[in-house]
Amino acid sequence: MLTLHRLFVKTAIVYLILGTALGGFMLANKGWFRINMPHHFVTIHNHMISVGFVMMMIMGVAYWMFPRPSGVPLREVGREPMAWANYFLLNLGLILRFVFEPFADWQPAGNLLIISSLLQMLGISMFVVSIWKRIRFPAGK
């Protein structure tokens, strides 16, 4: 497993821990603390789990397990610029979402949330483009 693949998987695990902790706190808050929390934290929790954990894990495993393009050495697969851009754009978009979601009603934060969603969509698009060429029939079939 190359650095890129490990980074995707380990980052996904971090998002799982953070998302589960936030979800656990929100659940405990309902029963014990009764702190008035904005609904935006539910959105943050959902993004941490669905995009941060599930999607990053799928991407990391796909980059690792899908056959590399013919004639491309293994080390070169781990240096693919589009895959690295996918990783950084998706994470930058997620971090912007986590930071500015609680302030979504404030106009500058709303603009940054739009940028956040565009970065995430661009990162996902880069994943699709970079993984598409790996989806093929096995050699000799």
Image (spheres, helix red, strand yellow):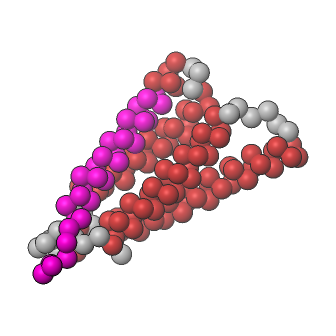
Residue positioned most to the right: 32
Where's residue 50, x and y in %?
A: 52, 51
Residue displayed at 81% across by 49% down: 28
Residue 96 visible, this orientation = yes
In the displayed structure image, the side of residue 54 where residue 89 appears, left or right: left
Residue displayed at 68% across by 33% down: 39
The picture quadrant where one finds residue 61 is: bottom left
Q: Which residues are magenta?
A: 112-141
Q: Is residue 46 above or below residue 62?
A: above
- The mark tally for this picture is 0
Q: Main secondary structure of the magenta part?
A: helix
Q: Is residue 31 above or below residue 60?
A: above
Where's residue 21, x and y in %?
A: 68, 54
Residue displayed at 86% across by 46% down: 31
Q: Quadrant of the C terminus?
A: bottom left
In the displayed structure image, the side of residue 23 where residue 140 appears, left or right: left
In the displayed structure image, the side of residue 26 where residue 7 appears, left or right: left
In the displayed structure image, the side of residue 23 where residue 59 appears, left or right: left
The picture quadrant where one finds residue 122 is: top left
Q: Is residue 39 above or below residue 62?
A: above
Residue displayed at 57% across by 33% down: 101
